[in-house]
């Protein structure tokens, strides 16, 4: 069945097409009785607005681009759930693209989304990204951009992320309170703020509790290439274990699960031989062997706040100068770090 048009409604109700259009968009120029009449007729006859025609008229597509590292990650999926909820409630569609931790692919995603006419872009940069000129160029044109989860000081835009220093401090302080003092730290190798902040939280906890910092107990592992990540993580774990740490604090979801698997595969009893805690939002953490102690990030809330911030920018609302919103993390202690 073909859809009825604005002209069809106009003829049926004997009012102008422009009046019908304004009534359907809840314009203040149209009286309430006319609005009710038009809306009732449109609903009864299953009127569906032509989104493309409207986007050409108003210069907006009511669509938002979202660039993430990879969709096969529970933390990312939870953020996307929050983004989708806010965008759906606000009448916006989302177009999701994956960088797969590649700088070149990230640039291609941004270019494609911009060419497709999205009203704004939310992005969690790849681990390979050190040059942000592709985003700075769009920003200089007044194009709305919001960074979420992974952020950088290279861009003066609104940002939403977890309080990484707090989360890392919580994890390290927990290990110290459990009696561990020789604590290793395994993190990703990246220029993004997340890496530095989690390393800083680790060092702050050591200093506060008067535990000496040892450089040989820290490894930064390049996991930007998925094909080489397992090999590099295994090498980093082997190097750390030569130092005979009592516990390991891992800084990402990938590193946390891979470290647990490595220790199990190499005959370590956890936590009797070595304790483990890491950042992870995996719903499997409680049922792993042993159950994994984690720092859980407010993933859905990050997505919701980032999406609402971008929508406000797209609508032209004055939300003040660019700011970074830090959300609290949650320490979840399980068997892997308990004495």
Image: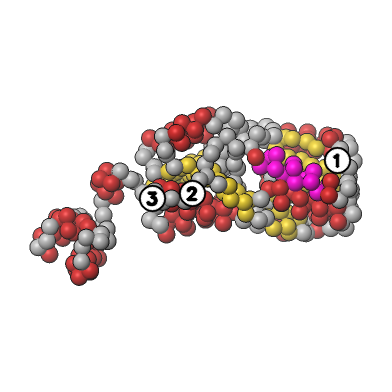
Q: Residue at x 52, y 54 (%)?
A: 305
| Dominant SS in magenta | helix
Q: Quadrant of residue 71?
A: top right
Residue 211 spot, x, y in % from top left: 88, 46
Which SS class for mark 1? loop
Tell which tag, 2 or 3, sits nearer the viewer: 2
136 on left or right of 6: right
Q: Residue at x 47, y 54 (%)?
A: 308
Label pair 2/1, CB-CB below 8 angstroms: no
Residue 292 spot, x, y in % from top left: 75, 54
The magenta stretch spans residue 202: yes
Q: Which residues are magenta?
A: 194-206
Q: Which residue is mark 1?
A: 213
Q: Residue at x 57, y 53 (%)?
A: 302
Residue 75 spot, x, y in % from top left: 61, 51
- In the foreground, 309 or 10: 309
118 on left or right of 250: left
The correct choice, above or below, for 73 with respect to 8 in the image is above
Q: Which residue is mark 2?
A: 320
Q: CA distance from mark 1 to mark 3?
A: 49 Å
Q: Mark on residue 315?
A: 3
Crowd tier of the residue under label 2, counting other residues whose Cα lies within 10 Å: few below 14, some 14–19, many 20 or above: few
């Amino acid at each position: 069945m073909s859809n009825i048009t604005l002209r069809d409604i106009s003829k049926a109700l004997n009012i102008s097409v422009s009046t019908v259009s304004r009534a359907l968009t809840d314009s203040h120029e149209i009286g309430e009785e006319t609005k009710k009449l038009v809306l009732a007729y449109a609903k009864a006859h299953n009127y569906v607005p032509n989104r493309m025609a409207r986007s050409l008229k108003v210069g907006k597509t009511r669509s938002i681009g979202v660039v993430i590292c990879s969709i096969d990650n529970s933390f990312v999926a939870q953020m996307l759930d929050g983004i989708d909820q806010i965008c759906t409630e606000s009448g916006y569609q989302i177009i999701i693209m994956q960088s797969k931790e590649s700088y070149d692919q990230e640039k291609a995603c941004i270019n494609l989304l911009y060419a497709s006419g999205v009203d704004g872009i939310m992005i969690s940069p790849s681990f390979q990204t050190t040059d942000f000129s592709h985003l700075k160029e769009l920003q200089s044109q007044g194009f709305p951009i919001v960074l979420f989860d992974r952020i950088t000081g290279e861009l003066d835009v609104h940002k939403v992320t977890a309080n990484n220093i707090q989360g890392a401090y919580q994890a390290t302080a927990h290990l110290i309170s459990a009696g561990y003092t020789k604590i290793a730290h395994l993190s990703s190798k990246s220029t993004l703020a997340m890496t530095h902040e989690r390393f800083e939280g680790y060092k702050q906890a050591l200093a506060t509790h008067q535990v000496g910092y040892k450089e040989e107990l820290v490894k930064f592992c390049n996991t930007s290439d998925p094909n080489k990540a397992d090999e590099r993580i295994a090498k980093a774990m082997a190097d750390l274990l030569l130092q005979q740490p009592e516990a390991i604090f891992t800084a990402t979801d990938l590193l946390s699960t891979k470290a647990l698997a490595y220790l199990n595969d190499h005959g370590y009893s956890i936590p009797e031989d070595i304790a483990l805690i890491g950042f992870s939002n995996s719903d499997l953490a409680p049922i792993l062997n042993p159950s994994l102690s984690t720092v859980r990030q407010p993933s859905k809330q990050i997505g919701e706040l980032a999406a609402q911030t971008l929508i406000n920018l797209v609508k032209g609302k004055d939300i003040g100068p660019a700011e970074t919103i830090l959300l609290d993390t949650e320490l979840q202690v399980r068997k892997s770090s308990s004495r």
